[in-house]
Image (spheres, rainbow, N blue to C red):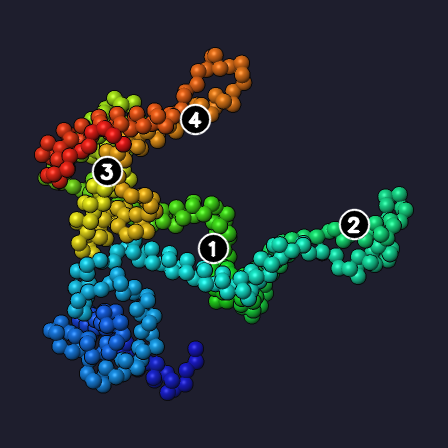
Amino acid sequence: MNLSGSQKYNFEELRNHINDTLLNEQMPDKLYKSVDGILRIINTILITKGDNWASQVLDENGDILLTPEEQAKFTNVLKPHIDSIINFFDNDKMLGGAPLSVTEMTDVATPVGVDDIYSKIINRIGNVNSTVNNYASKYGILKLEKEHDIDDDVKIIPTPINTAISEGVLGLSTMSGFPIAPPITMEVLSKIKVPFRTIIFTIYLILDIARLAIGITGPPIGRKIMSILLAFLELLKGDWKKAILTIVGYYGMIPMLIGQLFKTFLTLFRTLSPDIQNNIIFGSLDVGKSFIIGVLLSIFQVTAPVQIRKPLIDILNKIAERKAEMDGTLEGTGLPERPEYLSPNWNDLNNIQAVLSDKAYICSCEGRQLVAAVNKSAIIRIILEILRIPINEDMITQKCGKEDCKDFVTTVVKEGIDAKSEEQTVPTAMSAAMPTAMPAAMPTANPLTPIKKQGLLRRGLGELGAFAQNSLLPSGGNPHGKRKVRRGGS
């Protein structure tokens, strides 16, 4: 870039000023105060609903933070954005008392954690999907596709060409050389139709291939024009994600190729079942959390001194003993034992992750009560979420479903009954498909009927409830000092 003398001087002066500012020893303190002031302003807007907020922003000493001139200036600047700020931060979930500073943000009654931010992002993306699809359904190509879904397919041979072919202008004839009668030709050609969506798909595919070809071999201006054109057409179709991945091709060939790769992945991802897509979206967050905990556990396993290692090994052995006793109780009632990975030891320390995120417990009433009791600050909330324990409503629904919670014993017994029912359904289905001459040699398993399930549930609740009362719970099996574990019944 060529700069004139005055421009070069101004650029050098600006760069020196930035360097001096970043190297200033007071920079961290100034940055903290700036962030603190921004948080105080936002929190005051949320509390006051934007009504005369500028005069109510207080500093750490309880004094008014802004001067009258600053109040007027900030009020005028932020006035068009007050509603957006209130809607974005969801004031009903972030109410407090006095304005919050940086350090006080961790003491909010309902702290915001990783799962909350992730859920908000997913919900925002869903809102954008709905908005863009509604617009495209009214004014875009998506509207044409929906209209043609119930209309007749499109003739690919126009009527003038059809007439010319039928009258022999283009010389259609049979294999033996005899001409085909015009009415027959007209009738056959008029039935050659394709769905409207096929035409749209073909056009988009040709444009995408042309964009890649021009971007790789042609001038940059061609790549830029094709990227803008195709992104606009994809937006009209309601596919804003592909439009974003297409428009990045405007900035270079490498961004274009990367965007095309992600477009291919997005297309393949959409071929999956919606419930699988949902599991991948939320499961990818769990994968990241589990990887972090797994790395920390591996480091801890290698570096932990004996003073810390030995007590933990004793605790893990007790957990394994209790798990073995519970498995024995379940087998005594005719139910399968719980998974082996729920029994951690020092050699398989990573099994602790499975224990901490055991669905039967964290989705039980006892588990939810324990989480509610300890979830009192943002730090604890983040730790629980990293351990893959669901905290907010979206994650609870994703992991536990929308049903009301049940006690741990009932959940474990029901889990065993469902597992046994699945085990017996498979051989029953296989035997039903066998030839009729083989039943005598291969007896089939009878699936669990509702009556048998109810009997197993009652027996399992009684046996496992007694085990929990005598072994797992303190004070003779009274977890809360009042309520006893119920024996029998469903």
Is residue 370 shown above or below 160?
above
Q: Is residue 395 visible?
A: yes
Q: Quadrant of residue 309?
A: top left
Q: Looking at the picture, how far across and down is residue 269, in whole percent?
A: 47, 49
| Secondary structure of the residue carrying numbered label 2 | helix
Q: Which residue is mark 4?
A: 426
Q: Nearer the viewer, mark 1 or mark 3?
A: 3
In the image shown, does 383 or 138 lie closer to the viewer?
138
| Residue depicted at x 70% and y 52% | 193
CA gap between label 2 and label 3 equals 69 Å
CA gap between label 4 and label 1 equals 40 Å
- Sequence-first tag of 4 and 2: 2
- For disc 4, the neighbor class at 10 Å (few under 14, some 14 to 19, many from 20) is few
Residue type, numbered disc 2:
Val
Outermost residue to the top: 440
- Sequence-first tag of 1 and 3: 1
| Residue depicted at x 29% and y 43% | 404
| Secondary structure of the residue carrying numbered label 4 | helix
In the image shown, does 47 or 156 lie closer to the viewer?
47
Outermost residue to the right: 178
Q: Which residue is mark 3?
A: 407
Residue type, numbered disc 1:
Phe
Q: Which residue is mark 2?
A: 188
CA gap between label 2 and label 1 equals 43 Å
- Sequence-first tag of 2 and 1: 2
Split into 4 quadrants, where in the image is the C terminus? Answer: top left
- Sequence-first tag of 4 and 1: 1
